[in-house]
Amino acid sequence: MTFQLDPISYKVLLVDDEENIIRSIARLLMEQDLDMEILSANSGLEGLETLKAHPDVALILSDQRMPGMNGAQFLEQARELVPDAVRMVLTGYADMAATMDAINKGGTSRYLTKPWDDEVLCRTVLEGLEQYRLLQENRTLTALVEKQNLELTEWNGSLKGRVLEQTSTIRRQNEELRTRNQQINKAFRNIIVAFSRLIEQHSTRLQKHTANVTELSVRLANELKLAPEQIETIRTAALLHDVGTIGMAPELLAKPMTAMTSGELQLFLQHGVRGQIAMDEVEELREAGVLVRHHHELYGGEGAPDRLAGEGIPLGSRIIAFADFIDLELSEQRGEAAVAAVLERAKKELGQKLDPALFPLIEPHVRALYLSGAAPPSALVEKELRPKQLMEGMLVTRNLHSSSGLLILAKGTLLDSYRISTVLRHYQIDPPAGGIFVSWSPSGTESGLHNKAVSRRPAEQEDKETEAELQPGHLIEGMRISRNLYSGTGLLLLTEGTVLDDGKIVSLARYYQIDPPAGGIFVSHTRKTR
Ligand SMILES: [Fe+2]
Ligand SMILES: [Fe+2]
């Protein structure tokens, strides 16, 4: 008779003061096909010592009746040393009270009676070992689950960290890409603008033409509430619409279209196609190139190069054609009357040359663009200045050419910071022979020096003020101008009563460099005596 158990080694401790009982039980157990190590002790004390040396004992079978420490007492102490070990007691029928004691105090799970039945004893021991194995297995599995839970928690934590890290990396890379994209787009737009400046420099008639046509076209596109990409395409096309004129004879370009012979006109009108061919080389410019091709089509269908008509002409081309018409008509003249006359002429061309639907939209912008900042010529005073003396808002009064003959600034150009920096660069690389002829008007100085808000003081207070003539470097904020101040060329720079602030002092110092007044600045102290 044999019992089956997993093939692992189990330690079994037999405790009995009778050596022959130990031997016979040991022999019985050894007959089982088990990898079992039998330990033995002849007393409770000896049994406790053995357990200290072998804390991995799986099962203890102890006699109840032993001299000194009985089985219940021994098992009670053994429970402290090896709590997992299955404890059994071997007892006679008469010892029921002691057996109950062993069960209650020693945590004994089974008891066997003397004399024992071999089969019952073997089965009981093997069941005890199985109980021990299950307990250990349960403990191992629980530990494994806890360990895996811990690893899973750590992995989750680190996974979350990695995901967050990768998300932030992707976000950063996206940001970098967007910035680079913006830089590339900006560079691309700047190149187009630079190219349009080249077109302007190619002919005196085209000075500011592309800038004006672009401004007007974009305003019109905005009025039509076109999509941002469409507006950008129209802006690009407007900036480059006359790029095909590069290479044409300057004499031809200097002529108005109405003064050209039919042969000259035919040649001139090729610039739309020439422009498109040039732009077709760059994929990003192809769409704009189509608008450039058709910017001389006429709404009535008699234009070049394809005699398209009405809405068969791309909308962008119709917009640029309208702006082109207005700017060419206004290239020689300015002022309220000229703008009104040109708008009248445009009205007559509606349906023939120009798209009628665009007229009401463009009209207010023509007035805003061509009438703003126009100063009456009589108010202008001309002066030749060095590049560093130029200021925004000054009007160029003579064409400015570089030493190699390139037109840098055309007469009539209003200086802005961009144009001033362009002039400065030209003076470094291809300097003109002299200075820049400019003029500025009293009305143009409103933002700087001229102060209309002059407040007079009561006569009795004025008597107490002291007047002094100062140089620009001695002015301080809060001083009041006591006499009108004129520049060397007679411009009114400061009116009596103006109270000086920092901006006015700086502007005045500049005027002392470029158009100095005859004397100093008369100021009065604002000291009150009553
Ligand atoms: Fe053109
Ligand atoms: Fe044009």
Image (cartoon, rainbow, N blue to C red):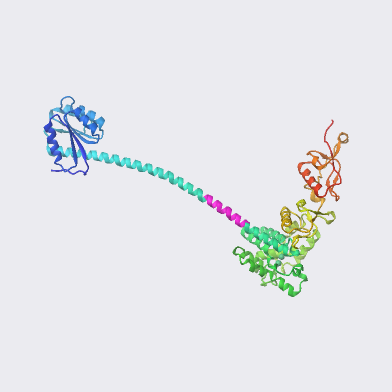
Residue 186 is situated, as x and y percent measured from the top left of the image, at 63, 56
Say if 502 sits above or below 391 in the image: above
Look at the image and tell me in which quarter the N terminus lies.
top left
Residue 83 is situated, as x and y percent measured from the top left of the image, at 26, 33
Q: Quadrant of residue 253?
A: bottom right
Residue 315 is situated, as x and y percent measured from the top left of the image, at 65, 64
Residue 255 is situated, as x and y percent measured from the top left of the image, at 77, 68
55 sits to left or right of 168: left
Q: Is residue 153 at least partly visible in the picture?
A: yes
| Front position in the image: 189 or 216 | 189
Look at the image and tell me in which quarter the C terminus lies.
top right
Inspect the magenta stretch and tell me whether residue 179 lies in it: yes
167 sits to left or right of 421: left
Q: Quadrant of ligand 1?
A: bottom right
Q: Which residues are magenta?
A: 171-186
| Front position in the image: 31 or 72 | 31
The main secondary structure of the magenta stretch is: helix
Q: Quadrant of residue 191?
A: bottom right
Say if 80 sits above or below 327 in the image: above
Q: Is residue 391 at least partly visible in the picture?
A: no
Q: Quadrant of residue 372?
A: bottom right
Say if 142 sits above or below 241 in the image: above
Query: Farthest residue in the top direction?
Result: 68
Residue at 83% in and 33% down: 527
Inspect the magenta stretch and tell me whether residue 506 lies in it: no
